[in-house]
Amino acid sequence: MPSKERDNMIKLECTECKHTNYFSHKNKKILKNRLEINKYCKFCKKHILHKETK
């Protein structure tokens, strides 16, 4: 994978159980703030807010 794609890679962590469940890409020029998305957590077994981690 080229390094350009790795720079835009983000991890999404469940706010309830703190597991890292998803990996995604983000355009950092457009989205300055941390990303927050409602996603399904397989550990909690429900849809919960996932936040971007470092």
Image: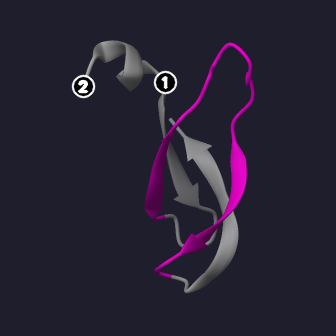
- Comparing 15 with 32, the one in front is 32
Q: Earlier in the sequence, mark 2 or mark 1?
A: 2
Which residue range is magenta in the image? Answer: 19-43
Q: How is the image coloured?
A: one colour
Q: Say left or right for 36 vs 50.
A: right
Q: Is the Cβ of the residue at disc 2 closer than 8 Å to that at disc 1?
A: no
Please, is residue 24 above or below residue 40 in the view?
above
Residue shown at 67% from the left, 76% from the top:
47
Residue 52 screen position, x and y as percent: 60, 44
- Residue 1's tag is 2
Residue 32 screen position, x and y as percent: 73, 22
Q: What quarter of the picture does the N terminus occupy?
A: top left
Q: Report the amino acid beneath label 2.
A: Met
Residue shown at 45% from the left, 61% from the top:
21
Please, is residue 3 above or below residue 18 in the view?
above
Please, is residue 46 above or below residue 39 in the view?
below
Q: Quadrant of residue 9?
A: top left
**Residue at mark 1:** 8
Circle 1 — which element?
A: loop
